[in-house]
Image (spheres, rainbow, N blue to C red):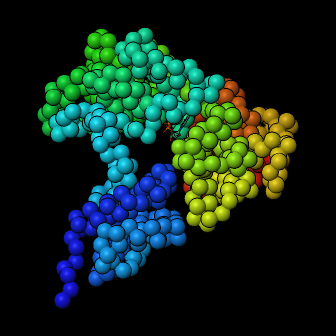
Amino acid sequence: MTAAAPQDSELKELWKKVLTRLQPTIGKNHFITWFNKSCILNANAAVYKIGFPSTYAYNWVRDKYHIKILQALQEIDSQIKEIEYEVDGGLMNPDDIRGIDIKEFLFGAEKRSRQILVNQDKTECLCARTLNHKYPLNNFIAGKDNRLVHSACMAIANNPGGIYNPLYIYGGVGLGKTHLLHGTGLEILKNFPDKNVIYVTSEQFVNDIVGAIRNQKVTSLKEKYRKADCLIVDDVQFFGKKEASQMEFFHTINDLYESNKQILLTSDRPPAELDDLDNRLKSRFAMGMVVEVLPSDFETRMAILQNRCAELGLVVSNDVLEPIAQYIETNIRELLGALNQLIGQVQFNNIQPTAQLSLRIVQKFYSRDLMIKTAHIPTQNVYQGVSAVPTQTLSPDRIIQAVSEFYKMKPEDLTGDCRKKEIVVPRQICMYLMRILLDQSFARIGEGFSNRNHTTAMHACEKIENEIKTNYRVARDLNSIKIALGV
Ligand code: ADP
Ligand code: MG
């Protein structure tokens, strides 16, 4: 007669016991990395099958910790004879409760006490969001260009509703705006645990309002927002033309401001350039402090990479990190993404990280962008296999000339007013190349095209950047133009 197979809950408890035994023998960061979302999938007779959410974790644990796991299991139940391993991607699904959340397991009690629901009553308020503990303010590396914004956030955390109100942060994608918002909210709560901090994106705010109107719950929603001691709204450029929500937002901001409650906002552009927004709202945004978050310089990018390695408990030498910091210049999210790729490959293949590997990752991962970006590579490039191209001979006129020749149109067509589609895309390509190859400001680029607004140049660059990823023709055209330009 065989014993009944253990229930899922029993397996979970058993796995927790195993983890409790393993944990002191494995470094904390490794433990978190390799055992997160693991579980005992099933137990059949004396064979226990252990599940991991990724092949990385599966390979690593099987190779390094097999004996320890078996010993730990046998200490608990001497009948257990064998263990098997399996990859089960479903374990990463947030709704899948089989796997153990290791951070919760390690820091559960501590974390629970710190975890602050931004809004107390989730059922009534759809806007409730938890601030993300991944983004503490002291983890934001402020290079010389971003010290001001960082200091403003610190000042707010020490004195919410004080002089920097509202604080309006704007700047490009992946530069840490959301990080700063969460960090400031968390810091406020650390200093003033009773304060009610609400974090929403503008889209969530709009959805809340629309939902409340539909369900005739506008009054209770208004109350919720007005109870905030600090209202944080991310990406206000997405408010668009939704008048009812804009009005509600305007009144909310006014009421909070007048009661000295802190308001924090972000956007991809300065208030004056939020074309679809009511003027009163724009001027309200601009009344406190408006500050731009800027791309980090090389040293800061290196510091960000080193900091992330330290967080993960990894030691990676500077020469390995340098190619990543050198190539990925404008988006910290991508910078960290490339580092993740590197770490993944190193751990998966059990190899040493090298500068060559980093360079390969950056080139492969960002090959589309690099097609254009090669002009950024310094002439004295130390990394093998990458040709260096000087940029001195380039000028806006040469770019316009090359693009007009390629598309067989007059240079004046490109710089003029015509909005025909066959001219608009080449014009956007000119703008994009001026940005990428000459590092010109959007304002300067706009001026060269019949004094267009700098947002037009910004949109053109964003558009072409997206097109390169999705539209083979645009990517190919750009490449040919680049060759014609000798870059
Ligand atoms: P944004 O909101 O501007 O698009 P995010 O705040 O989402 O950018 O940042 C993208 C990623 O880059 C996040 O993981 C964030 O922690 C990280 N990051 C950005 N800037 C910095 C910085 N200066 N120091 C540390 N991490 C940063
Ligand atoms: Mg953001």
Q: Quadrant of residue 288?
A: top left
Q: Quadrant of residue 456?
A: top right
User: Would you place residue 138 above or below residue 43 in this image?
Assistant: above
Horizontal placement of 15 versus 291: left or right? left
Quarter occupied by the N terminus: bottom left
User: Would you place residue 386 above or below residue 246 in this image?
Assistant: below
As drawn, the residue found furthest toward the bottom would be 1
Horizontal placement of 307 versus 159: left or right? right
Horizontal placement of 271 versus 130: left or right? right
Residue 267 position, x and y percent, is: 47, 29
- Depth check, front residue: 424 or 175: 175
Residue at the (41%, 17%) spot, across then down: 158
- Depth check, front residue: 77 or 57: 77
Residue at the (57%, 64%) spot, across then down: 348
Residue 386 position, x and y percent, is: 80, 53
Q: Is residue 284 visible?
A: no
Residue at the (38%, 53%) spot, across then down: 102
User: Would you place residue 132 above or below residue 385 in this image?
Assistant: above
As drawn, the residue found furthest toward the left would be 216
Q: How many marks?
A: 0
Residue 248 position, x and y percent, is: 27, 24
User: Would you place residue 27 above or below residue 179 in this image?
Assistant: below
Q: Is residue 397 visible?
A: yes
Residue at the (35%, 54%) spot, across then down: 101
Q: Quadrant of residue 193?
A: top left
- Depth check, front residue: 166 or 44: 44
- Depth check, front residue: 27 or 116: 27
